[in-house]
Amino acid sequence: MNMILDELTQKGKLAKAASYSLGILTTQEKNHALTAMATALRESYDYLLEENAKDLALARETGMASGLMDRLTLTRERIDAMAEGIEQIVSLPDPVGETILDTTRPNGLNIKQVRVPLGVIGIIYEARPNVTADAAGLCIKAGNAVILRGGKEAASSNRAIVKVMQDAGTSAGLPEGSINLVENTSRESATALMKLNDYLDVIIPRGGAGLIRAVIENATVPAIETGTGNCHIYVDKDADLSMAKEIVINAKTQRTSVCNAAEKMLVHQSIAPTFLPEILDALCEKQVEIIGDARVCTMYPAATPAVEEDWGTEYLDLKIGVKIVDSLEDAISHINRYNSGHSESIITKNEAAASRFLKEIDAAAVYHNASTRFTDGFEFGFGAEIGISTQKIHARGPMGLTALTSTKYQVFGSGQIRG
Amino acid sequence: MNMILDELTQKGKLAKAASYSLGILTTQEKNHALTAMATALRESYDYLLEENAKDLALARETGMASGLMDRLTLTRERIDAMAEGIEQIVSLPDPVGETILDTTRPNGLNIKQVRVPLGVIGIIYEARPNVTADAAGLCIKAGNAVILRGGKEAASSNRAIVKVMQDAGTSAGLPEGSINLVENTSRESATALMKLNDYLDVIIPRGGAGLIRAVIENATVPAIETGTGNCHIYVDKDADLSMAKEIVINAKTQRTSVCNAAEKMLVHQSIAPTFLPEILDALCEKQVEIIGDARVCTMYPAATPAVEEDWGTEYLDLKIGVKIVDSLEDAISHINRYNSGHSESIITKNEAAASRFLKEIDAAAVYHNASTRFTDGFEFGFGAEIGISTQKIHARGPMGLTALTSTKYQVFGSGQIRG
């Protein structure tokens, strides 16, 4: 544990020192460094693939599942994609320095609220090396130093990516310690990073429900809860049923492993007899397992009976929980009880029902007549995101560069004292 | 512990249910209820004073210090002040419902980001009954339900204030469960409230350093760190020395028990020989104890030698830490190392030095030629505040009504699915 703390303290000090210099760089200086990083990644195919091969060899030895193996694998194309991701970040507007408020008080004090970097950001993630480049790029663009703690399965790949990016950044004028990787990848190092209050301003988990829960339970550093999506689509009595069918199929099956995929469908009882057989047949054709409440199972015997736990579960799989509700109110109260605050959609031609749903549902994104799959930084037009916040403080929904900043009051006086 | 959890779960459910109704009230409806609460407080002098007398009797028995006793005491004037505080909140603009962003994407999706209440707010505080009225008023105005956990010393007073406010609010149309008080005032109830993730959206401590540390260390609910102020005034080599003297005296002595009072003075070495004797004599005259670094003690033998711990300590007392620095850079790096992120001031006629200080100092409020005592919701023109945030996520500096809100994306489609 002492070795872990030694490493974290040393990297924390480096990152903190770097953050003061990073915070006052111009947009041009940051973009210059990011562009150099993208170029350096492209010029380092051989080194990166060699280091990645070490991780892959270990993964094969330990019998890693093929899906995870795929996420861990780097190729020339994937390295190009990382570099392009950083170039896209270069093209995003820099939020730092924006004046949000400018007011002069009766006593003559001029008060400006300006946007500043957060300082030092901790990111804890799993075995996806692309997150390393992506998260570092976003943090740097917003003027922050970053301490990355990736999964042990990607340790060699992450070390190589950080080395390439930090070296290129330093040559292009970034301070040493702008991008730091925690070498110790034990569970203890993750927990210790969550408690590194002296050096971290915020910690952001990127990964599965277990990781996020661990951060919520252990972090003493301010944390941002991201990613879990138990998303619902409510098909109202006044829905356009062919639109509803298309949207449900899209939200459930277009990509099942993502947080904005639909996990539940609620159907108004008055349309259930006509709509349910059709949509459930269509879902079955797409290999989706139907988990139904009692009424659904009666109407559609191929459904598996749901248990209480189903309603709160994010399947991330070809499975959907289906429930018949008696009214819009029942739909709203079911969703507010079981959702994870991510994305919820109502399908209806009734404007009053839609308006009520959009107002009363408690979630980061609420949709009328659209698929939940759009909750995403690019789809919202914000560009790359560091994650999708499902908590309510600081940022909610897709977190772009602005979510990686804070503000500061600058107060200009001429000798004012308080009476 | 089970009884505590039972109470918290019951109040959490009530508050959560209330929050859905509160969130969709109009400004007029909320103002009507708040006005009724203010009136009800004024009509309840006898009841409130009677209940307060029970707390005071217990406090006398346990030998409470006179300062705390004073803060605990209600009078007609103080009840009037609580009522006026709520009326001031009525007059503040309602942040809820504001459209922050409105954009239409190439696929036709219209995305609106709107301001919504946080939901359920937990407030943990000490033996100041006025915080009960103040915090409840601010939370309700921003459309939130609140769970209050005040100090045991004020239990009867708090119960009475909450009863008067909730009853008046309910009669005026607020849902039951809008304002909840935790009856159990053990340390365990505070800790359990900090972990009530199923029902609380945020927890805010209002009180001393010990309480704030306990929240940071124990909370699994998103927390906002408030209040600690180890504030510095740096007197630059180019300072107007008579202005510097006035500002230091004001920031240190005008009120010592508040978080925006100055705790440290840094003096540039080139002006120390002329400025120090004068300012230190003036501080001594005001009964301020001088804690000096080695150079200060040599120059001013009446000073007490500082130890390392002094530089990070918020005295909240007639004490000031004084240090001679060799340069602006030294001042900035000392402050960034030891400050608590609250309020820092530079006194100088040199614009370049001021600009650098305001840019590089990491704090919620940075001042040029003014007293740190202005960091306050009213002084900034925001009206009443729930606290002063010294963390960087969500809100920084004085937290007005907007800091008690979140946002939500409302997305309007016409059948869009993701390709």
Image: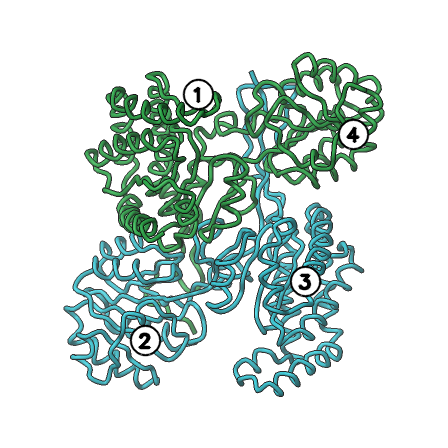
Chain colours: A green, B cyan
* Image quadrant in which the C terminus of chain B is located: top right
Q: Amino acid at mark 2?
A: Ile
Q: In this view, which residue lies farthest toward the top? A: A285
To the question of a shared chain for discs 4 and 3, the answer is no
To the question of a shared chain for discs 3 and 1, the answer is no
Q: Nearer the viewer, residue B412 or A324?
A: A324
**Residue depicted at x 48% and y 36%:** A399
Q: Amino acid at mark 1?
A: Asp
Specify which label sits upstream in the sequence, 4 or 1. 1
Query: Along the horizontal axis of the image, is B383 left or right of A414?
Result: right
**Residue depicted at x 21% and y 80%:** B277
Q: Nearer the viewer, mark 2 or mark 1?
A: 1
Q: Which structural element holds mark 3?
A: helix
Across and down, in percent, residue A138 comes to 38, 35
| Vertical arrangement, residue A232 with respect to residue B161, above or below | above
Tag 2 near tag 1, CB within 8 Å: no
Output the chain of dot 4. A
Identify residue for label 4: A293
Query: Along the horizontal axis of the image, is A268 left or right of B366?
Result: right
Query: Along the horizontal axis of the image, is A207 left or right of B52?
Result: left
Identify residue for label 2: B320
Q: Amino acid at mark 3?
A: Ile
Number of marks: 4
Tag 4 near tag 3, CB within 8 Å: no
The image quarter containing residue B59 is bottom right
Q: Amino acid at mark 4?
A: Asp
Q: Which mark is residue A313?
A: none
Identify residue for label 1: A70
**Residue depicted at x 34% and y 78%:** B319
Q: Nearer the viewer, mark 2 or mark 4?
A: 4
| Vertical arrangement, residue B238 with respect to residue A307, above or below | below
